[in-house]
């Protein structure tokens, strides 16, 4: 009795000790959450930009959690809608400064909002990171504010250099808002223009805050209509005022060259024009050819950027804007600072915020930079990020890189003498005390003529297609390498060459044999991809970048074609074109990136359902026959044996035929045959055991139960087999 009591007491005590430990392991306690405030325009005219901020930041946080970062730290996001309004921003800043759970702020979107809110953040000791507000004084007078893009002064000087050296224009006119934002842009623009000996023809201004602002805008529109040669029109304004002016003066027949600031570079700018019937009827009616300098263009990024674009598109179904990319990086900087900080409540929120601010301020050089979507992330002495800016222009409402871009030479190891020689040769330019080289953008288009000779065993195919290149300047097509071609492909003479005022289009007709990478595992529902890749071995990526041409070639740039013929048993399911980065190693430590253009042609079988039925219907009939064999008398061993032999022979014949058609390929559909074989073994085993039991004199009731077991077990095995095939096929 005493032993039993002792055992019970030990069991109870052990449970008291072990159960909480087990529960803690299975359901660990979550640390107290800390919050990052995200402030931007989540409604109103700039809602598109606010949503882009939100998506980039959210994706960064989700990635960090998947990667196992922020261990023992629970970070959540809290969103505030300032509508790009200063008064609203001030109220939100007051809320944030009173909330001891908030570690830092990401935003605001506009400089005007960021500056008034930033004063409160500075007094309360809350670090803030913006990836869009470019006002110069935002970071120079506030040592708690950080910026993951260059300031407006740098962006304006880039803009002037692009106008003078890339667009090769020397005469400009300005339209600017007299407010802080517009006046600062206009002042920086005129200073830089005079340094490059550019002629400023006209200046128009308005005061957005004034009651008569609409009358002032109407006056600018009237005057502009009377000017024959304004040169390049530069807008130092926010997007809504620019859209109002441009929709009134920019129409078919006018050829104003228009350049704007970064507020022109996002989808919200286009949405302003979609209010007008002309732009809705014909995309680009008002916006085609408008230039702007962006803090970043995703197409110009490296491999990290390409991976981000792929994940972003898969998640949100759209291409990321520069806003999403730059705010992703702002969040990434915050995460890196938080990882290196102790968030224990005992330290107090003020000390935690001060630590975060100091961690951020510690990223001051490329040696300790964070690798972000937009490049290496580190701050200068004013807590801004220096980076080459990109010139884009609108075509059919798509903002795409211009044919010539500046790429920073910072960190490049070439000797200074060589840089000076290249500068003299006009290959390198000095902008804002940084050397930059010129990178050519070549747009590539692809159109299939025919597909043939697909050999699944030899892994080869023949493709007949047209390839065209849209570019400015010189183009050396003879140095291209097609690594998938069985014999070298040479682009020697274009079949058509069209030279326009802005660009040249060269079209080539190519027919060649290529290596395939076919995998019919999902037969007959397999989708096979034909890949064509090429790169220029003489020009690395900092000299030339291939990008997909979203524009159809001009009339005559492609010969007239019939609709794409389907190749024997296949039809084209889709064609995608994209740039990839090919790293070529020159030694163990040195590799150079090259721009590689990729074409992927997806093919699917024309008779997928018919092929599936041809395979599965006979197997279904065999499976049904096998099931009904369980209803034969137990002593009918010969009849059962004939049925089993026939089913085995038929299934084996079909299986062998499939193997002969796809030798050496592991098809998912093959597992259906294994299910049939398993059912056959089950039925044969039940029959053999039943026959043996009868010979041994077992009673009919026991033999009947055995038969019943065979009938019940058969559909269960069939169901398990079908589920197994399904899960195998779906990975």
Image: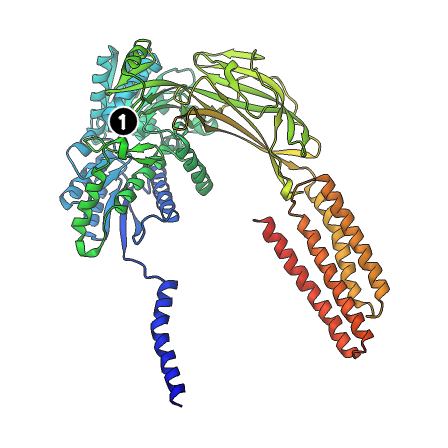
Q: From the viewer's side, name the closer residue of 500 and 642.
A: 642
- Name the quadrant containing residue 204: top left
Q: Residue at x 21, y 27 (%)?
A: 207
Residue 256 on image: x %, y %: 36, 16
Q: Is residue 714 left or right of residue 314?
A: right
Residue 433, compared with residue 723, is above or below; it is above
Whether residue 293 is visible to the viewer of this picture, yes or no, is: yes
Q: From the viewer's side, name the closer residue of 319 and 520.
A: 520
**Disc 1 residue crowd, few under 14, some 14–19, many 20+, Cα 10 Å:** many
Q: Is residue 182 left or right of residue 491?
A: left
- Name the quadrant containing residue 86: top left
Residue 515 on image: x %, y %: 61, 28
Whether residue 566 is visible to the viewer of this picture, yes or no, is: no
Q: Is residue 603 left or right of residue 534?
A: right
Look at the numbered disc 1 and give the secondary structure of its residue: loop
**Residue at image mark 1:** 237
Q: Residue at x 40, y 90 (%)?
A: 1
Residue 630 on image: x %, y %: 78, 66
Residue 394 on image: x %, y %: 41, 24
Kindly give the residue lying farthest to the left in the view shown.
123
């Amino acid at each position: 009795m005493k032993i039993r009591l002792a055992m019970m007491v030990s069991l109870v005590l052990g449970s008291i000790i072990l159960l909480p430990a087990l529960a803690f392991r299975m359901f660990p306690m979550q640390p107290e959450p800390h919050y990052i405030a995200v402030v931007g325009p989540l409604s109103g005219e700039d809602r598109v930009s606010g949503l882009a901020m939100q998506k980039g930041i959210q994706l960064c946080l989700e990635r960090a959690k998947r990667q196992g970062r922020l261990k023992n730290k629970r970070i959540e996001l809290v969103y505030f809608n300032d509508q790009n309004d200063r008064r609203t921003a001030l109220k939100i800043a007051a809320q944030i400064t009173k909330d001891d759970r908030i570690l830092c702020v990401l935003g605001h979107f506009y400089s005007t909002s960021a500056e008034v809110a930033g004063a409160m953040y500075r007094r309360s000791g809350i670090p803030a990171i913006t990836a869009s507000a470019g006002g110069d004084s935002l970071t120079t007078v506030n040592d708690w504010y950080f910026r993951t893009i260059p300031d407006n002064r740098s962006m304006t000087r880039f803009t002037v250099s692009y106008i003078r050296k890339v667009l090769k224009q020397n005469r400009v006119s300005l339209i600017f808002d007299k407010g802080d934002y517009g006046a600062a842009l206009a002042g920086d623009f005129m200073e830089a223009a005079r340094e490059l000996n550019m002629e400023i023809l006209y200046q128009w201004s308005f005061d957005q805050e004034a009651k008569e602002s609409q009358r002032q805008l109407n006056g600018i529109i009237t005057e502009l209509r009377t000017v024959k040669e304004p040169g390049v029109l530069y807008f130092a304004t926010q997007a809504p005022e620019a859209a109002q002016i441009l929709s009134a003066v920019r129409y078919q027949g006018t050829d104003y060259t228009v350049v704007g600031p970064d507020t022109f570079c996002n989808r919200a700018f286009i949405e302003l024009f979609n209010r007008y019937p002309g732009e809705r009827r014909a995309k680009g009616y008002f916006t085609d050819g408008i230039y702007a300098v962006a803090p970043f263009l995703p197409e110009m990024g490296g491999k990290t950027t390409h991976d981000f674009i792929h994940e972003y598109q898969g998640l949100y179904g759209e291409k990321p804007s520069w806003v999403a990319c730059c705010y992703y990086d702002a969040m990434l900087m915050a995460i890196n600072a938080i990882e290196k900080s102790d968030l224990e409540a005992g330290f107090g929120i003020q000390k935690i915020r001060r630590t975060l601010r100091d961690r951020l301020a510690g990223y001051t050089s490329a040696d300790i930079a964070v690798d972000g979507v937009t490049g290496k992330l580190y701050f200068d002495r004013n807590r801004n990020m220096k980076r080459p800016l990109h010139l884009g222009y609108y075509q059919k409402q798509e903002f795409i890189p211009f044919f010539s871009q500046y790429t920073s030479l910072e960190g490049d190891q070439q000797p200074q003498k060589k840089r000076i020689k290249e500068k003299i040769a006009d290959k390198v330019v000095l902008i804002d005390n940084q050397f930059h080289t010129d990178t050519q953008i070549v747009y590539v288009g692809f159109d299939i003529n025919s597909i043939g000779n697909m050999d699944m065993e030899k892994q080869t195919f023949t493709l007949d297609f047209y390839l065209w290149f849209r570019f400015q300047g010189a183009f050396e097509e003879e140095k291209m390498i097609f690594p998938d071609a069985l014999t070298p492909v040479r682009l020697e003479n274009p079949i058509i060459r069209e030279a326009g005022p802005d660009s040249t289009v060269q079209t080539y007709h190519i027919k060649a044999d290529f290596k395939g990478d076919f995998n019919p595992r999902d037969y007959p529902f397999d989708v096979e991809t034909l890949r064509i890749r090429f790169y220029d071995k003489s020009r690395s990526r900092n000299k030339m970048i291939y990008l997909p041409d979203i524009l159809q070639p001009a009339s005559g740039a492609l010969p007239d074609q019939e609709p794409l013929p389907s190749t024997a048993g296949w039809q084209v399911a889709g064609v995608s074109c994209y740039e990839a980065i090919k790293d070529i190693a020159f030694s163990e430590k040195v590799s150079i990136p090259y721009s590689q253009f990729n074409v992927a042609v997806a093919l699917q079988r024309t008779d997928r359902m018919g092929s599936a039925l041809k395979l599965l219907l006979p197997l279904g009939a065999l499976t049904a026959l096998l099931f009904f064999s369980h209803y034969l008398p137990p002593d009918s061993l010969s009849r059962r044996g004939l049925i089993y032999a026939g089913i085995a022979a038929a299934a084996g014949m079909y299986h062998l035929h499939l193997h002969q058609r796809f030798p050496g390929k592991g098809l998912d559909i093959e597992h259906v045959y294994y299910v049939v074989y398993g059912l056959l073994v089950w039925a044969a085993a039940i029959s053999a055991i039943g026959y043996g039991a009868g010979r041994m004199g077992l009673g009919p009731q026991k033999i009947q139960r055995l038969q019943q077991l065979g009938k019940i077990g058969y559909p269960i095995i069939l169901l398990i087999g079908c589920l197994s095939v399904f899960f195998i096929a779906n990975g």
